[in-house]
Amino acid sequence: MLHPNPDRQATLILSRQPAGAFTVNGKSSASLGYRYSGSGVSEGEGVWAEWNWDGRKLTVRNDRFGFLPVYYAQLPSGFGVSTSALELIRAGAATDLDDAAVAVFIRLGYYIGNDTPFKAVGLLPAGSELTWSDGSPSIRTLAPPISETVSTLSREQAVREYGVRFQEVVEAMVPAASERMCVPLSAGRDSRHILYALVRAGRNPSMVVTARSAPPRPSTDAEIASRITTALKLPHMIIEQSEDRFADEMQKDLLTSFCADEHAQMVPVARWLDEQKFAASWDGIAGDIFSCGVYNDTRMLDQFRKRELAELSDWLLADDGYLTTSLTPTYRERWNRDLAVTRLSRELDQYADLPNPAAPFFFYNRVRRELALCPYGMLNQQTQILAPYLSHAIFDLLINLPFDYFRGRLFHSEAIDQFYPELPQVEYVSTSTGFVPEKRSKIWRFAKSMSLMAIQGNASQSCIRRGFLLPRLAKAMVNREFGTEVPALFSRILVMMHLEESLALSSGI
């Protein structure tokens, strides 16, 4: 049974007064996300976070996986906790950047561990309890450790058990029959598995929704989703990309606390969800991490086993590419590659002894720290977002399966096709090939807006070299192919420029 919590976003700022008492701004008690219960459902299931200030002590908790971000910070005269890191900055948290964290972000596109752009702002660790009562916060871990035992299930048994458990999880999470819900559907496996489980349960969604892919990616998602919904006779809405990608990037940065270089293409879907006022929408986050093996790589496994973590970090960070010329000399040195390698190596070390270390590393880092910011930073402004792949039963089944079970990336496909033989057997497309050029008017609009942001900033204090950026934005205006690639190519540059502007960092980051 689904138990939705009342809050979507919340902030609490505690400020000590001269007499010693604390004033409260915001919500002294907040309950975010959702829980669910049922036969065989473990305690604490769901995606949730909560806090309570009783006048003397603040207690903050979250669920086992911590995908709903809650940030905290020591303030000049107190303490703050919020679903937005920017609210804590506005409340007075120091704006000094965490150089090691930023060095990783500009190379990976996301923050790792519990880092944020700011030294003074932390992310509540997964499965934790934070307490504060006028001093430094104390954090203890409540989540169980990741098992180091390899499963004894055969591959065939594991595929079958996955299908059974997933169906049970979805049925336990289904909202009340009177509640309107929608299901996003792509050409991949994760969203289709959710839809088929709902259809099997006799609970068809009020609407199936697909975002039109942003160029240069072909619109394969919309095409495949239309075939499936037509076969099932379900209503289907295709959300077009907006005319102003730059504005979407700005909105995305604010909703994700400047912690992600992706998701601008989902801003139109977020707006649509806010307008439609569905009680719930489903999300396939984390489905491909374990059941499809998308991050499994024999080289990674070998380097984990040998504890060649610096070498693995160097490989994951890939070539610096344009970073060496886009950053000013000061910031090129400040956010240097060695700093990023050291920070990433420390994070990798936490997973090196697990049976399949790559999967949990990416689960708790790329998926939790970047991908989760779409459903739990952008799409959940007005709508409850349900994530069945974050079930404890699913995680505990898949985390211990041998690496070899996922070779060929067929595990998830087999689970769906075998469990739902009566439903449409349409091919899966995880990655689209081909190149769709962007409209020239949209390229011009984006390049012009980004150029103006660069020109209006303080060039002597900025981390980005105008001499690098402006000629390339001019090229984007006349070269359609290059212009189509620019939003993705310069996504991390744009995040840093927007961060400078938003925090008035032109006097020195």
Image (tube, grey):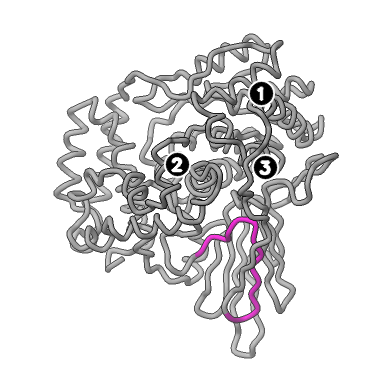
Residue that mark 2 sits on? 301
Residue that mark 3 sits on? 396
Q: Element under label 2?
A: helix
Residue 132 is inside the magenta segment: yes
- Does 507 sit left or right of 244 as displayed? left
Q: In whole angstroms, how far apart are the C-alphas of marks 2 and 1? A: 23 Å
Occupied quadrant, residue 286: top right
Residue segment shown in magenta: 122-135
Dot 2 or dot 1: first in sequence order is: 1
Residue that mark 1 sits on? 156
Give x and y (percent) for residue 96: 37, 69
Q: In whole angstroms, how far apart are the C-alphas of marks 3 and 2? A: 20 Å
Q: Residue at x 37, y 51 (%)?
A: 308
Asked if the residue under mark 1 is in contact with the one under mark 2, i.e. CB atoms within 8 Å, the reply is no
Q: Element under label 1?
A: helix
**Residue 207 in view (yes/no):** no
Label number found at residue 350: none
Dot 3 or dot 2: first in sequence order is: 2
Q: In whole angstroms, how far apart are the C-alphas of marks 1 and 3? A: 17 Å
Residue 164 drawn above or below residue 93: above
Give x and y (percent) for residue 419: 70, 19
Q: Residues within 10 Å of mark 1 (few under 14, many from 20)?
A: few
* Relative depth, front residue between 424 and 498: 424
Give x and y (percent) for residue 375: 57, 41
> Disc 3 residue type?
Asp
> Disc 2 residue type?
Leu
